[in-house]
Amino acid sequence: MAKVKTVYVCSECGYETPRWLGRCPDCGSWNTLVEQESAPAQEPEAKKLKRAPGGGSDPVRIDEIPDESMLRHSTGIGELDRVLGGGVVEGSLVLVGGDPGIGKSTLLTQVSANFAAAGRRVLYVSGEESTRQIKLRARRLGAFSENFYVLSENDMNIVERHAERLKPELMIVDSIQTMYRPELASAPGSVSQVRESASILMREAKVSGCAVMLVGHVTKEGAIAGPRVLEHMVDAVLYFEGDRQHQYRLLRAVKNRFGSVNELGMFEMAESGMKEVGNASEVLLSDRAHNQSGSVVLCAIEGTRPLLVDVQALVATTVFGNPRRMASGVDAGRLALLLAVLEKRAGAPLYNQDVYINIAGGMELDEPAADLALCVAIASAHRNRCVGGSWAVMGEVGLAGEIRPIAQPERRLAECRRLGFTDALLPKGNLRGVSAPEGLRVHGVETLVEALNTLGLTAR
């Protein structure tokens, strides 16, 4: 019997080394090398794939490639179709990640039921739950159909054999970290097992035209567990965000080869499953405190969707040696930069003030258009003066205190008017060639001081 050797594999990039290292020499990540057993040297036949990974195709001139439109199928859930770019593309490989209990399996069970109800065959493969557990969830969601097949299995060889026999149009794998190939010596969830299982599923999707949706576990940092190559292999990566203690969930696309990236969908967790929220702006502003200082409305753009969000700030005199700066929903470094601009260019004495920022509804803002709303909210809380409830504020703030133009101003203004706002504060550079909706007054500003003057937030 051959001696079993151990190797150390990086969980981020898959780099292998015979000895443990604190830092991966390939990708530079720290503490990512995991010990694994390598396959015995005298058993090369067990390591061979069932079929060659290549297709043996020949190069083709690009002008000779036939023009074929992508065939999409609706999931029956409008918000999910929006995030995917219009529906599930035939032969696509989609990865869905999120915290435990966030609703990934619930949403994909609903998608499976909608596909099956439309007469398409669905295979739901679970490596974590028994068929009885899946039936209990399906009964709660009302997901019963003769085209809905369930398989509780971890062995990829068996899964591949059943997929070839059933020929489904949609296959769900929950989750990719529980799948394994018996020919590989490593444990399920390891770099080699995840990479090989994903490769088999990708080949199945591209050859048969079956759309495959994978569920991925996430680490404590929020990234999908396993090798980074998994996200490179798939066609789309969707992240479920939100707190399990709250009813709203956000589905965000961070990669999509068939549609817009950073697209956002909103869902409400109910007893009967995930319910889509069509009017997200109205929901995010439904509990907004009116006539209170430190609250400003911003129209953000998520992918192709305008969203009105409530930017909240609280400023209080510090009792510590160093003032505290805490931000939820925005980058802390960006907040520090804007505080410096407010103090230097607008004369706001914030050096002895604690500043707290919150984006209501659990939203994450990373676009520059949120700068002016953040500055106005901080100035409003500092002066203890209310910004009128009819105002919407948006713009990028530079280090010199100038207000820079933002993208897609017309769509933002149209959303503001649809929700009943009558005044909008916008960079002056965006006023050229932009027609404001009827009933909405647009005020153009060039500097941060001018913006604060317009809203009555200058020093006493």
Image: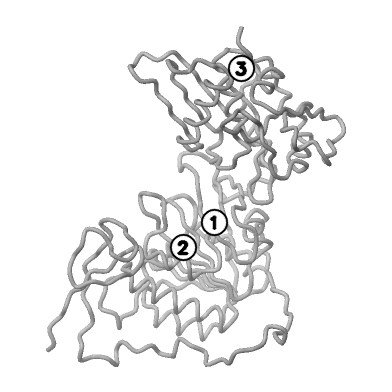
> Are dots 2 and 3 in contact, CB under 8 Å?
no
Residue on which the image places disc 1: 254
- SS type, badge 3: loop
Give how far across and how far down residue 222 sits, in percent.
41, 50
Q: Nearer the viewer, residue 212 or 292?
A: 292
> Are dots 3 and 1 in contact, CB under 8 Å?
no
State the separation of the CA atoms marked 2 and 3. Answer: 43 Å
Q: Is residue 317 above or below residue 390?
A: above
Task: Give the quadrant of the C terminus.
Answer: top right
- SS type, badge 2: strand
Please state which amino acid type lies under the numbered disc 2.
Val
- SS type, badge 1: strand
Residue on which the image places disc 3: 292
Give how far across and how far down residue 83 sits, in percent.
62, 56
Q: Residues within 10 Å of mark 3 (few under 14, many from 20)?
A: some
Q: Nearer the viewer, residue 312 or 73?
A: 312
Residue 167 falls in which quadrant of the image?
bottom right
Please state which amino acid type lies under the numbered disc 3.
Gln
Taking the image as shown, residue 2 lies to the left or right of residue 76, namely left
Counting residues from the N terminus, which is met first, the one under dot 2 or under dot 1?
Answer: 2
State the separation of the CA atoms marked 3 and 1. Answer: 35 Å
Count the labels in the image.
3
User: Residue shown at 23%/82% (left/top)?
Assistant: 39
Residue 19's label in the rendered image is none
Taking the image as shown, residue 58 lies to the left or right of residue 184, namely right
Taking the image as shown, residue 418 lies to the left or right of residue 107, namely right
Residue on which the image places disc 2: 215
Please state which amino acid type lies under the numbered disc 1.
Val
Q: Is residue 392 above or below residue 67?
A: above
